Amino acid sequence: MKYGWTAILLITGIAGDASAASFDCAKASLPIEKTICADPALSKADEALAAAWRASLAASLDKPALRNDQGEWLRGRTGNASELTSAYRERIDALNDLAGKWSAMPRVFAVDDLKKTCFVTPEADASSTCQVDESGKVEGDDKLFYQLRSFHDGDLRTSGGAVVFEAPSLTPLVGAYGDSAHYDRPKVVTPPVGTLLWIPGYLEGTGNFSAEQLYAWRDGSWQDIDIDSWKAEMARRLSGGLYVAKGIFPDYRAMTAATPIWRPIDGNCCPTAGRAVVRLGLKDRRLTITDMRVTLGRAAAEAQ
């Protein structure tokens, strides 16, 4: 999944001057920022959106998905001040509705219920049928439990999800959900960068793209980590049109990742350019590349 971090920082930034925008209008440089600052109603709507966003983010268990969704909405904003004000009102209503639904979710679960009762989160399709696939203790932490779920439309599996709970009252802490997603047992791992909660996951399809989530234990809580921006940095480092066509699944115990590399003429099935091996670090709630080595050639691309 991809985060719109620049856009997110805009909407969650420190409130600016008396114009009431959610950012400092004295520093506005983008056309959308100037449009917001030039219109009092839109400026106030931007501030209200920032408040609705913060409330929704605080209530949500699936913060990575919400950040992604908000980033896409922010990047898609178009129109004049009147059209934008209307779009802002709709988005504010949607975020407030989502915050209300998350806040209404049960905050205590019984161990026995994990085996038979789905913890259905607000983003799930209400018309689908939820099935508990697996539950138990999280590997690496006896205080954490998990539930893996799948959602079905008749015989068709449409989506999947995972929720992690904290004992003794089994309070839900974090959750993952995605269309065509499959999740595996969550794990707590302790690489040199600190204690991490890892929810493995992938999306159906030939690309086998990642749906996993990663959280770091900081300041007494699990904080979600941006696990996508480093992939964009890797793409920028590749030259000659070389690229990565499928999902990358790091080993968070070792903080390393490896992937074949494709040439522009390669089919999706068969990379021939080589292989990249990356060492990862953690900074400011995002994964970073601390080292990247590329070995060219078909043999490297086909190596396991």
Image (cartoon, helix red, strand yellow):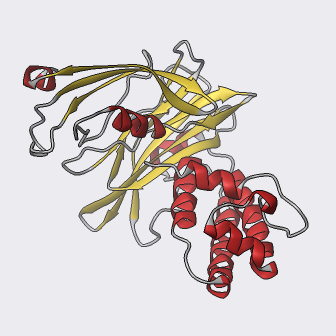
Residue 268 appearing in the image = yes
Residue 96 appearing in the image = no
Position of residue 169 measured from the top left corner of the image (x, y, whole percent): 69, 38
Position of residue 177 measured from the top left corner of the image (x, y, whole percent): 46, 52
Placement of 127 over or under 170, stated as above or below: below
- Left or right: 149 as drawn, with respect to 46: left
**In the image as oriented, which residue stretches furthest toward the top?**
192
Splitting the image into 4 quarters, where does residue 201 fall?
Answer: top left
Placement of 170 over or under 18, stated as above or below: above
Placement of 137 over or under 71, stated as above or below: above
**In the image as oriented, which residue stretches furthest toward the right?**
18
- Left or right: 60 as drawn, with respect to 207: right
| Circle count | 0
- Left or right: 239 as drawn, with respect to 64: left
Question: Residue at coordinates 17% horizontally, 37% vertically from top-left?
Answer: 262
Question: Residue at coordinates 25% horizontally, 39% vertically from top-left?
Answer: 243
Quadrant of image for the C terminus: top left
In depth, the one of 274 and 210 nearer the eye is 274
Question: Residue at coordinates 73% horizontally, 56% vertically from top-left?
Answer: 54
Position of residue 143 measured from the top left corner of the image (x, y, whole percent): 62, 25
Placement of 148 over or under 276, stated as above or below: below
Position of residue 186 measured from the top left corner of the image (x, y, whole percent): 46, 32
Question: Residue at coordinates 57% horizontally, 53% vertically from top-left?
Answer: 67
- Left or right: 102 as drawn, with respect to 182: right
Splitting the image into 4 quarters, where does residue 212 fall?
Answer: top left
In depth, the one of 95 and 29 nearer the eye is 29
In depth, the one of 213 and 44 nearer the eye is 44
